[in-house]
């Protein structure tokens, strides 16, 4: 905004961009260190002069200025697509993880031998585990979906073990 916004304009911005709203930057032409186009982020708050403060998925935090910076709200982003690349850190090394299924498999395998950390490429923590149990969560929504994937994996393993036991018992 080129002039100081009125209280009514500030309240309209706060209603339009409440905390937690997901946005994507289109361009920031007047910023000396702009957030790259295409970067997604989460609105933290709108301040008293109408700046929309965000935490971006690349780890940076910056305020967006309506009418100066170009950005748009992301309509119901699929949590499975939030992190196109994560890094799993375990006792025996690190591994690049490209989807939630790979994250679940990494935890299931490496969590048997020690604690695991899952971070972004920029080393921003998403969560840690105690063995195979998720804790110290920084993205609750992602971890809730991951727990569903892990539970499905555990149920499938349990069914396979039951089938194996039944097959061995019938011999």
Image (cartoon, rainbow, N blue to C red):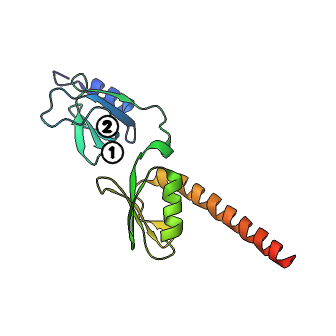
The residue labelled by disc 2 is 39
Q: Is residue 22 left or right of residue 161?
A: left
Q: Secondary structure at mark 1?
A: loop
Q: Position of residue 168 (x, y in %)?
A: 81, 76
Graded by Cα atoms within 10 Å as few (under 14), some (14 to 19) or many (20 or more), the crowding at tag 1 reads some
Q: Earlier in the sequence, mark 1 or mark 2?
A: 2
- At horizontal 28% and vertical 31% (from top left) the residue drawn is 37
Q: Position of residue 17 (x, y in %)?
A: 36, 33
Of residues 106 and 6, the one nearer the viewer is 106
Q: Is residue 36 left or right of residue 76?
A: left
Is 161 rendered above or below residue 5? below
Is 152 rendered above or below residue 158? above
Of residues 57 and 97, the one nearer the viewer is 97
- At horizontal 32% and vertical 53% (from top left) the residue drawn is 121
The residue labelled by disc 1 is 57
Graded by Cα atoms within 10 Å as few (under 14), some (14 to 19) or many (20 or more), the crowding at tag 2 reads some
Is 26 rendered above or below residue 155? above
Q: Secondary structure at mark 2?
A: loop
Q: Is residue 52 left or right of residue 162?
A: left
The image quadrant that residue 26 belongs to is top left
- At horizontal 56% and vertical 58% (from top left) the residue drawn is 147
* Quadrant location of the C terminus in the rendered image: bottom right
Specify the farthest residue to the left: 32
């Amino acid at each position: 905004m080129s002039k100081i916004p009125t209280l009514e304009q500030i309240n309209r911005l706060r209603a339009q961009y409440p905390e937690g709203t997901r946005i994507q930057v289109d361009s920031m032409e007047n910023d000396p260190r702009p957030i790259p186009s295409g970067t997604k982020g989460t609105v933290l708050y709108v301040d008293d002069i109408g700046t929309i403060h965000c935490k971006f998925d690349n780890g940076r935090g910056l305020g967006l200025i309506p009418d100066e910076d170009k950005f748009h709200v992301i309509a119901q982003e699929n949590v499975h697509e939030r992190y196109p690349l994560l890094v799993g850190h375990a006792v025996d090394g690190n591994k690049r993880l490209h989807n939630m299924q790979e994250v679940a498999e990494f935890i299931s395998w490496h969590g048997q031998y020690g604690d695991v950390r899952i971070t972004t490429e920029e080393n921003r923590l998403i969560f840690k585990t105690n063995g195979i149990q998720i804790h110290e969560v920084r993205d609750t929504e992602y971890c809730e979906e991951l727990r569903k994937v892990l539970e499905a994996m555990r149920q499938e393993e349990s069914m396979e073990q039951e089938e194996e036991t039944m097959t061995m018992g019938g011999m």
